[in-house]
Image (cartoon, rainbow, N blue to C red):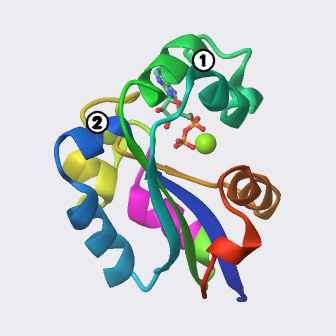
């Protein structure tokens, strides 16, 4: 296994409920380092660009509305096997199917408002990190 970086987003349902610190604790307790982080409000256009791979999916419009409905915290996580590790800590997309102890099991409201995003591959992680961060903003 190698040290990897992955893009994480704390979604508007979680920032609205002041869960940033609790979610960050889950990530750090799992051994993921937060090497960049900022709280921003996505425009609809920026959300559409981020989720462009999903533009043919039936939930795309609602998802972009949701992701631009309030603040998000975008962050770069770093650690051994970080991409897969973060996906395990997050839990399944649908919180009803998520394992006990995962972020989505503990905090998600529903399959859309599911508290966190995490890159699902090295290729997507590279695209998604560059979508929000310059190299100079990432301090490992
Ligand atoms: P994940 O975030 O687990 O990688 P996907 O990439 O498949 O899941 O979907 C991206 C996001 O779109 C999900 O996190 C969720 O917010 C939303 N989403 C996925 N599937 C649905 C669905 N069936 N209905 C509503 N929203 C969905
Ligand atoms: Mg995904």
- Whether residues under marks 2 and 1 lie with C-beta atoms below 8 angstroms apart, the answer is no
Residue 99 in percent (x, y) is at 32, 56
Q: Which residue is mark 1?
A: 60
Residue 66 in percent (x, y) is at 42, 23
Label 2 or label 1, whichever lies nearer to me, is 2
Q: Residue at x 18, y 50 (%)?
A: 18
Residue 6 appears left or right of 39 = right
Q: Quadrant of residue 20?
A: bottom left
Of 105 and 14, the residue lying toward us = 14
Name the disc covering residue 45, or none: none
Residue 128 in percent (x, y) is at 70, 52
Of 95 and 125, the residue lying toward us = 125
**Most common SS among magenta residues:** helix
Q: Residue at x 41, y 57 (%)?
A: 90
The relative height of residue 99 versus residue 26 in the rendered view (above or below) is: above
Magenta segment: 84-92
Q: Which residue is mark 2?
A: 13
**In which quadrant is the N terminus drawn?**
bottom right
The answer to whether residue 101 is seen in the rendering is no
* Residue, far right: 123
The relative height of residue 25 versus residue 58 in the rendered view (above or below) is: below
Q: Secondary structure at mark 1?
A: helix
The answer to whether residue 75 is seen in the rendering is yes
Q: Residue at x 76, y 53 (%)?
A: 124
Q: Earlier in the sequence, mark 2 or mark 1?
A: 2
Q: Quadrant of residue 26?
A: bottom left
Q: Is residue 120 magenta?
A: no
């Amino acid at each position: 296994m190698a040290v990897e970086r992955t893009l994480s987003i704390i979604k508007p349902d979680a920032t609205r409920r002041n869960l940033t610190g609790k979610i960050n604790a889950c990530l750090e307790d799992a051994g993921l380092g937060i090497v960049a982080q900022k709280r921003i409000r996505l425009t609809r256009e920026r959300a559409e660009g981020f989720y462009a791979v999903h533009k043919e999916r039936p939930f795309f419009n609602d998802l972009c509305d949701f992701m631009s409905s309030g603040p998000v915290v975008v962050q770069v996580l770093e650690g051994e096997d970080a991409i897969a590790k973060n996906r395990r800590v997050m839990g399944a997309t649908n919180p009803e199917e998520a394992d006990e102890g995962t972020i989505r099991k503990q905090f998600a409201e529903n399959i859309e408002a599911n508290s966190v995003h995490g890159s699902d591959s090295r290729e997507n992680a590279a695209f998604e990190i560059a979508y929000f961060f310059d190299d100079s903003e990432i301090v490992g």
